[in-house]
Amino acid sequence: MKQDMIVVLDLGSKENAYLAREIRALGVYSEIHPHDITEDDLKALPNVKGIILNGGENRVVNGAEIDASPAVYNSGIPLLAVDHKGTEKWPADAGEKSKKLASFVFDTCKAEKNWSMDNFISDQIELVRRQVGDGRVLLALSGGVDSSVVAALLIKAIGERLNCVHVNHGLLRQGEPEQVIKVFKEELGANLIYVDAVDRFLDKLAGVSDPEKKRKIIGAEFIDVFKDEASKLSGISYLGQGTIYPDIIESGTKTAGNIKSHHNVGGLPEQLGFELVEPLKMLFKDEVRACGRALGLPASMVDRQPFPGPGLGVRCVGAITRDRLEAVRQSDAILREEFDKAGLAGKVWQYFTIVPDIKSTGIKNNSRSFEWPVVIRAVNTVDAMTATVEELDWNVLKKITARITGEVPGVNRVLYDLTPKPTGTIEWE
Ligand code: XMP
């Protein structure tokens, strides 16, 4: 293994993610693990040079104060216990805090500055090979950044023993299934199966308006589709996933509540019988892109905007109907086309349209119309944890508005969402 590691143990601090990033910024790889990590799990982590017990505001869980397991205290690995129990405290001054951190990492732990994407990839390839042995891995390849990068990494690690499955759940963007097949099957030579499951998903989602229920249905249906596909293939025992660190944080850790469940993380039933392979789960979004670049993926794939697993389903707000879903898909295609023309593609982090389940009065072809509005969302962020709104050029907005109201059936109005994250999330559901 090529990289040293500092483990941040989650004892309820909201700063854990920032601390891990600060350690990575020092040139040393860092991962966050739950406070009750077992002896076996701790031993399985490669090259752990130090552990930071990072206590914080969420240290009391279910009325009881949590502490690290004896395995941590008995590990013999250098520890820095920073918590309101008070062995140590972070200095209030940011510069002093960085000094204390660097002194622990380099003087106490003697960690080496060897965190780089190339080393990360080579370590992950080794860890995947160790985990999988000569087994086969099934991967849901949506074509988004995360699943594309994980596919490229797994192709490097295990080659044809990776079976990619591209499920068309009817919630994909215009032209997307065709593009996934072209890039992965034709260009990268992946073992790829295409599954048309449009009716299956849309029938299950009919009449369901609660966002969490929609996500759960989509997640559960995915699992069923995979089970079906896996049963047609022999010897599959692993499931590859493009889970990244923000997915894990937002789905709730042992010390923090759930913001929303990401289908990458929640809902995998025990009976599936697959062991997960998640080589990107400790990376932030910007690091996933860097990983893709280091793996040699083309910029058009690595720099493309992220797309949620539940797809257009979370942008067809409320109960999904086929006609309103089509309005989301067509308006999204127009938006992307106009962003391309205006030179904004690749500059704005994420941009898409939303069609809420409301109608308003308007005028079309000289008569009264009563139709949906399309909402445009265009945001910038580094790690998807916070986001600001792109200050779009008025003329670009006017052109997009004219095209959407002129070309998309059932739409008579266009709105621009001015809300940063927080208070809004990036998606509307
Ligand atoms: P939010 O809406 O949480 O979005 O501010 C942050 C980023 O995550 C994407 N997102 C999802 N990705 N499954 C995913 O794989 C999901 O359920 C999901 N919900 C949001 C969102 O598009 C944005 O990039």
Image: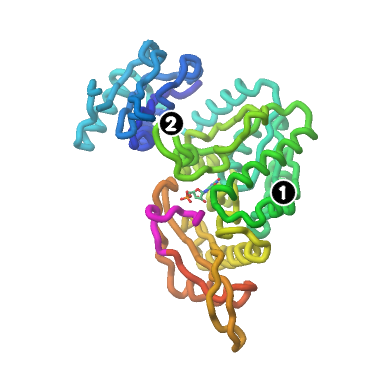
Instruction: Report helix, strand or loop for mark 2.
Output: loop
In magenta stretch: residue 420: yes
In magenta stretch: residue 97: no
Percent coordinates x, y for residue 179 in the rendering? 68, 53
Q: Quadrant location of residue 59?
A: top left
Q: Quadrant location of residue 94?
A: top left
Q: Residues within 10 Å of mark 1 (few under 14, many from 20)?
A: some
Q: Is residue 190 above or below residue 8?
A: below
Instruction: Report helix, strand or loop for mark 1.
Output: helix
Q: What residue is at 44 percent from the left and 48 percent from the top?
A: 384
Alpha carbons under labels 1 and 2: distance apart: 39 Å
Q: Which residue is mark 2?
A: 254
**Amino acid type, mark 2:** Lys
Q: Which residue is mark 1?
A: 181
Residue 26 in view: no
Q: Which stretch is magenta?
A: 418-429
Q: Determine the main secondary structure of the stretch shown in magenta.
A: loop
Q: What residue is at 69 percent from the left and 54 percent from the top?
A: 202
Of the pair 104 and 9, the residue shown nearer to us: 9
